[in-house]
Image: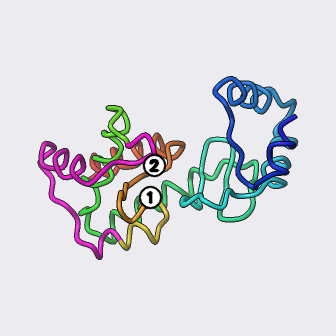
Amino acid sequence: MYERKFTVDEYAYFAREERKEAEEQIINMVDDVKFVDALNKVGKPKYMEVDRFIGERYFFDGNIFEKADKRDLLRDLVRNALKETKERDYFFLKTIIKLYYEGKWDRAYGGAIWIDILSKIRELGGSYPSPRDLAILKSYRIYFKTGSRRYPTHTVPVEMIPTIEEEMEKWKAES
């Protein structure tokens, strides 16, 4: 039923009811192997700016989805990023995560907007990291600049938030 939508174009619009039904079908797939095979068959959406997914049960690193728990890799990446930037990215990551929990992510692009980030960093008593520090954070693929050139947003993949947040709190407790 859904394949027909993709024969016209590589992008498909789903009405709310169709989307809910499609999500339920995906959620109710019998096993993880079928789910991962389906994701690999469809491939990464062309418009997707986030090229890494590290969840509790699944992993995606650019091209191939796997059934794997690689949160230890994510924990190491967070620690290394904080160490390399001498903790300057701590408040930036904390801010993006707090804005997510507060429901202040841009609905169209799925990330925090600049004005909200600056305001929240000040509220938390932190300072904004340098462009070099943001480049380092991007290189660890923990943080992504998303949105458009005109309406940029800043994001951390939602599935990675709990692990990143947990590791940041451990880092803060140890320092």
At label 1, the amino acid type is: Thr
Identity of the residue drawn at 37% across and 55% down:
154
Identity of the residue drawn at 83% across and 38% down:
2
Residue 60 image point, x, y percent: 67, 56
**Residue 133, placed above or below residue 28:** below
Instruction: Sort mark 2 into few (<14), some (14-19) or many (20+) by Cα contacts within 10 Å.
Output: some
User: Is 140 or 49 nearer to us in this picture?
Assistant: 49
Q: Quadrant of the N terminus?
A: top right
Q: Quadrant of the rendered structure where residue 46 is?
A: bottom right
The residue tagged with tag 1: helix, strand or loop?
strand
Q: Which residue is mark 2?
A: 109
- 99 is within the stretch colored magenta: no
Q: Which residue is mark 1?
A: 146
Find out whether the residues at labels 2 and 1 contact each other: C-beta distance under 8 Å: yes
Residue 159 image point, x, y percent: 54, 43
**Residue 43, placed above or below residue 120:** below
